[in-house]
Image (cartoon, rainbow, N blue to C red):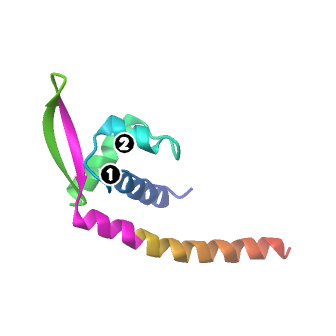
Amino acid sequence: MDIQLKRGLLDVSVLAAIKDGESYGYKIIKDMKPYLELSESTLYTILKRLETAGMLTVRSAEHDGRLRKYYRITDSGLRRIEEFKEDWKEILSIYRFVVKEEENE
Protein backbone atom coordinates (compact mmCIF):
# COMPACT_ATOMS: atom_id res chain seq x y z
CA MET A 1 0.00 0.00 0.00
CA ASP A 2 1.20 3.51 -0.73
CA ILE A 3 2.83 4.89 2.42
CA GLN A 4 1.01 8.26 2.23
CA LEU A 5 -2.36 6.55 1.80
CA LYS A 6 -1.66 4.23 4.73
CA ARG A 7 -0.53 7.18 6.87
CA GLY A 8 -3.77 9.03 6.12
CA LEU A 9 -5.88 5.97 6.89
CA LEU A 10 -4.13 5.43 10.21
CA ASP A 11 -4.52 9.10 11.15
CA VAL A 12 -8.27 8.99 10.52
CA SER A 13 -8.55 5.66 12.35
CA VAL A 14 -6.95 7.15 15.46
CA LEU A 15 -9.24 10.18 15.24
CA ALA A 16 -12.23 7.84 14.96
CA ALA A 17 -11.05 5.92 18.04
CA ILE A 18 -11.31 9.07 20.17
CA LYS A 19 -14.20 10.87 18.50
CA ASP A 20 -16.71 9.84 21.18
CA GLY A 21 -14.66 11.00 24.13
CA GLU A 22 -11.31 11.50 25.74
CA SER A 23 -8.95 8.52 25.65
CA TYR A 24 -5.36 7.48 26.32
CA GLY A 25 -2.77 5.43 24.44
CA TYR A 26 -3.39 1.92 25.78
CA LYS A 27 -7.17 2.30 25.46
CA ILE A 28 -6.86 3.58 21.88
CA ILE A 29 -4.78 0.53 20.92
CA LYS A 30 -7.26 -1.77 22.68
CA ASP A 31 -10.26 -0.13 20.97
CA MET A 32 -8.63 -0.40 17.54
CA LYS A 33 -7.39 -3.98 17.98
CA PRO A 34 -10.48 -5.72 16.52
CA TYR A 35 -9.93 -3.75 13.31
CA LEU A 36 -6.17 -3.24 12.98
CA GLU A 37 -2.91 -3.84 14.79
CA LEU A 38 -1.04 -0.72 15.86
CA SER A 39 2.18 -0.64 17.85
CA GLU A 40 2.66 1.84 20.67
CA SER A 41 5.49 3.58 18.84
CA THR A 42 3.36 4.01 15.73
CA LEU A 43 0.40 5.26 17.77
CA TYR A 44 2.40 7.87 19.65
CA THR A 45 3.94 9.13 16.41
CA ILE A 46 0.43 9.53 14.98
CA LEU A 47 -0.88 11.21 18.13
CA LYS A 48 1.98 13.73 18.07
CA ARG A 49 1.35 14.46 14.37
CA LEU A 50 -2.39 14.96 15.00
CA GLU A 51 -1.69 17.23 17.98
CA THR A 52 0.72 19.34 15.90
CA ALA A 53 -1.94 19.58 13.16
CA GLY A 54 -4.50 20.83 15.69
CA MET A 55 -6.75 17.80 15.30
CA LEU A 56 -6.55 16.81 18.93
CA THR A 57 -5.64 18.27 22.28
CA VAL A 58 -3.68 16.64 25.07
CA ARG A 59 -3.83 16.93 28.83
CA SER A 60 -1.83 15.09 31.46
CA ALA A 61 -3.29 13.73 34.68
CA GLU A 62 -2.06 11.40 37.37
CA HIS A 63 -3.41 7.84 37.26
CA ASP A 64 -2.23 5.17 39.73
CA GLY A 65 0.76 7.31 40.65
CA ARG A 66 1.86 7.86 37.04
CA LEU A 67 1.29 10.68 34.62
CA ARG A 68 -1.05 9.69 31.79
CA LYS A 69 -1.78 11.70 28.65
CA TYR A 70 -5.40 12.00 27.63
CA TYR A 71 -6.34 12.90 24.06
CA ARG A 72 -9.48 14.70 22.89
CA ILE A 73 -10.52 15.32 19.30
CA THR A 74 -10.97 18.93 18.16
CA ASP A 75 -13.44 20.36 15.66
CA SER A 76 -10.65 20.18 13.09
CA GLY A 77 -10.25 16.47 13.80
CA LEU A 78 -14.00 15.90 13.45
CA ARG A 79 -13.93 17.75 10.11
CA ARG A 80 -11.08 15.50 8.96
CA ILE A 81 -13.23 12.42 9.66
CA GLU A 82 -16.08 13.92 7.61
CA GLU A 83 -13.66 14.78 4.77
CA PHE A 84 -12.42 11.19 4.85
CA LYS A 85 -15.97 9.87 4.51
CA GLU A 86 -16.44 12.01 1.40
CA ASP A 87 -13.04 10.99 -0.01
CA TRP A 88 -13.88 7.35 0.61
CA LYS A 89 -16.87 7.56 -1.74
CA GLU A 90 -14.46 8.48 -4.55
CA ILE A 91 -12.05 5.72 -3.56
CA LEU A 92 -14.87 3.17 -3.64
CA SER A 93 -15.89 4.38 -7.08
CA ILE A 94 -12.32 3.93 -8.34
CA TYR A 95 -12.18 0.48 -6.74
CA ARG A 96 -15.41 -0.57 -8.47
CA PHE A 97 -13.95 0.59 -11.78
CA VAL A 98 -10.73 -1.39 -11.25
CA VAL A 99 -12.60 -4.54 -10.22
CA LYS A 100 -14.96 -4.19 -13.20
CA GLU A 101 -11.98 -4.05 -15.55
CA GLU A 102 -10.51 -7.21 -14.00
CA GLU A 103 -13.83 -9.07 -14.25
CA ASN A 104 -14.03 -8.31 -17.98
CA GLU A 105 -10.64 -9.90 -18.73
Which residue is pictured at 39% across the width and 59% down the height? Answer: 12
Q: Is residue 44 left or right of residue 60?
A: right
Q: Picture coordinates of residue 2 (x, y %)?
A: 53, 58
The disc labelled 1 sits on which kind of residue? Ile
Which residue is pictured at 29% across the width and 48% down the height? Answer: 47
Indicate the quadrant containing the N terminus: top left, top right, bottom left or bottom right: bottom right
Quarter of the image for residue 40 reads: top left
- Relative to 31, does residue 85 appear above or below in the rendering? below
Disc number placed over residue 74 in the picture, else none: none
Q: Picture coordinates of residue 57 (x, y %)?
A: 18, 53
Label 2 sits on residue: 28
Secondary structure under the numbered disc 2 in the rendered image = helix
- Relative to 87, does residue 36 appear above or below in the rendering? above
Which residue is pictured at 79% across the width and 71% down the height? Answer: 102
From the viewer's side, name the closer residue of 61 and 102: 61
Label 1 sits on residue: 18
Quarter of the image for residue 63 reads: top left
Q: Picture coordinates of residue 54 (x, y %)?
A: 21, 60
Q: Residue furthest right?
A: 105
Q: Which residues are magenta?
A: 67-83
Please rate how many residues cluster around mark 1, counting C-alpha atoms within 10 Å: few if below 14, some from 14 to 19, many from 20.
Answer: many
Which residue is pictured at 32% across the width and 51% down the height? Answer: 18
Q: Picture coordinates of residue 80 (x, y %)?
A: 34, 67
Q: Which one is earlier in the sequence, the residue at label 1 or at label 2? A: 1
From the viewer's side, name the closer residue of 90 and 7: 90
The disc labelled 2 sits on which kind of residue? Ile
As measured in the structure, the alpha-carbon distance from the residue carrying label 1 to the one carrying label 2 is 7 Å
Asked whether disc 1 touches disc 2, contact meaning CB atoms under 8 Å apart, the reply is yes
Give yes or no for residue 71 being in the magenta stretch: yes
- Relative to 65, does residue 48 appear above or below in the rendering? below
Q: Residue furthest front?
A: 20
